Image (cartoon, grey):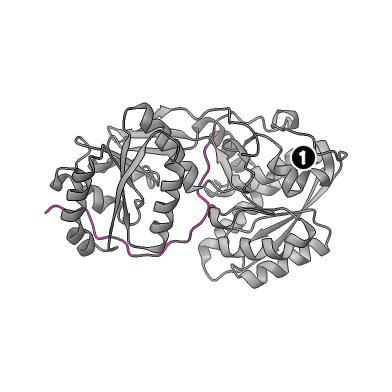
Amino acid sequence: MATSRAIDRRHFLRLSLLPAAALPLAACDPGAFGGGMSTGGRPGPVQVGLLVPSGAADPQLGIISDSLTKAAQLAVAEAEPGLVTLRTYSTAADPGRAQQAAQQAKADGANVILGPLLAQNAAAVGTVMASSNTAVLTFSNNSDIAGRNVLMLGNTFENIAAELGQYAAGQGRRRVFIINARSAAEQVIRDAAISGLSGTGVQVVGSAEFELSQEGLAAAMPGIANSVRAAGADALLLTSDTQAALPTLVGMLPDYGLGPSAIQYMGMARFDRPPSATSLPGLQGGWFTMPDAAPTAEFNQRYIAANGAAPHLLAPLAYDGIRVIAQQARKSGPAGVTPQALMNAGAFSGATGTFRFLSDGTNRRSLSVATIRNNSVTILKQASSRLGATGS
């Protein structure tokens, strides 16, 4: 049996994924930045408490913290002078410290909290900010923590699945079978995918798991293949990413009659990350979501001009958060950044495209659907510049 490579057993943090994009970014025109219902307040300055995981043991979190901070500062610099005041606080990736940082930010006069990054920290901050009805705009993509006063900036797995499901239905692929590793992270992604696919015109006809190892996957493949065929599936939704089980999985599937020429692959993770993944034979023709290139490139160029280095993939979330706050401050001042006002604010055009907050604290982000052809990315469906009604 042919296999690709040993599966990376690493545990990955459930961080915010890069959101999609739809509209070219009008960076210096605050009037171009969306907006919906009036909140009844008066225009005025808003103070923001930015919570980032600096000081954590993981050096990667330090890199992310630096990029989030610089992206937020860029958005402040582009806003009307004096409209947004930004103070940054360290959470060190610790829920208790995150709560203390939020409380200090509130004591310092913050009207809204931007961050934190990790889901458990955001949940903890949401709890201590609830009594004052202070909005917490978290960078997390974990929809389990959203609601009440916690609003998500991170692109959710439900959102990714919904975009894929709508596209698949339009292409006549309506019977989807989900394959995931038996890990807490991928089980969460699977459940989110099932939720996101609901109402898109496709049916989840089954799912199967494998132990997160090369041996575990090899042992599970005969049963998985039998289940896929018995279910009459015409598409496979794969929850693994290219840094874990995905390369090995797509290397094995053809040996059981489930190659990309026989059944459509769809990915909950990007198939072009890292860029070398586009050369994997098993990913050719697979469908995945990604941001629109034009506004992403605009943001990256301005970030590089300001900071001399490229942003982290999560940096646009901090930029978007400040842009939302600045727009609401210009219309309604502090009254515009309450949880209720933000949920009713309508669609915004941010660093990577169109998005809006939903009434449950999650969000809807417009995504492009892409594929790999001849080892290169091809856009199949451009991200839309329009989203549905607000607050739902």
Q: Quadrant of residue 287?
A: top left
Instruction: Confirm whether the magenta stretch covers residue 14.
Output: yes
Q: Vertical placement of 112 versus 169: above or below?
A: below
Residue drawn at 44 percent across, 41 percent down = 198
Q: Nearer the viewer, residue 85 or 252?
A: 252
Quarter holding the C terminus is top right
Q: Secondary structure at mark 1?
A: helix
Dominant SS in magenta = loop
Instruction: Confirm whether the magenta stretch covers residue 85.
Output: no
Q: Which residues are magenta?
A: 1-21
Residue 336 pos. (x, y %): 79, 43
Residue drawn at 76 percent across, 48 percent down = 338
Residue 82 visible in the shown view: no
Residue 99 pos. (x, y %): 69, 68
> Identity of the amino acid at label 1?
Gln
Q: Quadrant of residue 30?
A: top right
Q: Vertical placement of 346 versus 313: above or below?
A: above
Q: Quadrant of residue 163?
A: top left
Q: Nearer the viewer, residue 357 or 80?
A: 357
Q: Is residue 242 left or right of residue 192?
A: left
Quarter holding the N terminus is bottom left
Residue 325 pos. (x, y %): 74, 44
Disc 1 target residue:
328
Q: Is residue 184 left or right of residue 216?
A: right
Residue drawn at 19 percent across, 43 percent down = 258
